[in-house]
Amino acid sequence: MNARSAFLGLVMASAIGLAACSSGSDGAGGWPTTKVALAPVEREQAPRVFHGVGELEAARQVELASETAGRVVRIAFTSGQQVKQGELLVQLNDAPEQAERLRLRAQLRNAETVLTRTRRLMADKVATQEQLDHAQAARDMAQGELRGIEAVIAQKAIRAPFAGTIGIRHVHEGQYLNAGDAIASLVDGGTLNVNFALEEQAVPHVRPGQPVEIRVDAWPERRFEAQVSAVDPLIGASRTLRVQAGLPNVDGMLQAGMFANVRVLREQPTPVLAVPETAVTYTAYGQTVFVAEAGEPQGMTVRRVAVKTGERWDGRVEIVSGLKEGDRVVVSGQLKLSDGMTVEPVARDALHGDAASPQAKTALEQAT
């Protein structure tokens, strides 16, 4: 009798439990309703862009080096200094050349005197044309030798080729420099160029004057505006188009050598179907979204749909195929869903990103 009472009690408890489950289930098949955020598939004007990577360089930058060998007798700059065009930076020992210049100046004066005298004698028919030619050649050779030694003297006075900021120096007083040895870098950072490469398909769509958006790792939240200044007429060996854009550096935030992410804006936007990026789920089987559909008697249900996506911009993604305008897709809570589940949508204004109201954000948090 006790065993039979216990068995009946177990059956009654099971029945009560099943009834409780049924009363707490709003969806088909006994599944509880899941709160999700929905967004419509909308037709938008998508800003078409080409993406590339490149490097910043100054419009004028150079690695200063010596044109001739010599011992450093004077360093007239400090690292990081602003210098003017033509300002003396490094002086090499030019004492032997200075002495040679004095000798050649005297030689030139003597040759000019001989030439003047020969011309007078030629006028008096005392000197011959051959003597005049020899005097003329001697003057010209003396003049050439003097200009040659003056050029060497100028090479030993290393000056700034343009105004800018000089980098860290690599030389010291008393050091012997060979021709081509590096002294320091000189950069005029007022205007920068960004050199980058785009895919070959961009050839018909890129031309000088086109707007370019630049981002650098040092300032990840800031966008810098540039313009295409030149397009290489030759496609590179990697089948890419090489492009250069001019970038004003008014505030001095950018530096030559920085890595740059580049977006080249096409001239005409294109109307496309788009949804928030959070609507798309990426799996090993492809890209999918959950589409919400109204049904009876269980209410709104979801269906998994395979889609093909295109470009992305500002938190939106282009839908190339799989959806139609007006479809409503789940943008939050997909991990809890499967085909045929019943869902309860939250307020639609929770779907518009940063512009959402506090109530919308609360609803979105509840849905996730």
Image (spheres, rainbow, N blue to C red):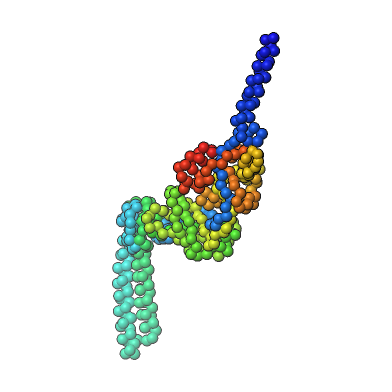
Q: Quadrant of residue 233?
A: bottom right
In front of the other: 22 or 118: 22
Quarter-of-image position of residue 303: top right
Q: Is residue 122 visible?
A: yes
- Residue 22 screen position, x and y as percent: 63, 29
Residue at x 63%, y 36% (from the top left corner)? 27
In the picture, measured across the screen, residue 245 lies left or right of residue 204, that is left
Count of marks, rendered view: 0
Is residue 248 placed above or below 360 in the rendered structure?
below
The front one of 163 and 266 is 266
- Identify the residue at image location x=46%, y=45%: 357
Residue 188 seen in the current view: no
The C terminus lies in quadrant = top right
Q: Is residue 197 left or right of residue 151?
A: right
Image height check: is 308 above or below 141? Answer: above
Q: Which residue corresponds to the image point at 64% horizontal and 26% vertical from the top-left?
A: 18
Measured as percent of width and height from the top left, residue 218 is found at 43, 48
- Judge left or right: residue 147 versus residue 324: left
Residue 261 vs residue 238: left or right?
A: left
**Residue 260: percent from left, percent from top:** 48, 53
Percent coordinates x, y for residue 144 in the rendering: 37, 72
Is the residue 286 above or below the residue 236 in the image?
above
User: Which residue is located at x 60 percent, y 39 percent?
Assistant: 343
- Check the picture and name the quadrant holding the N terminus: top right
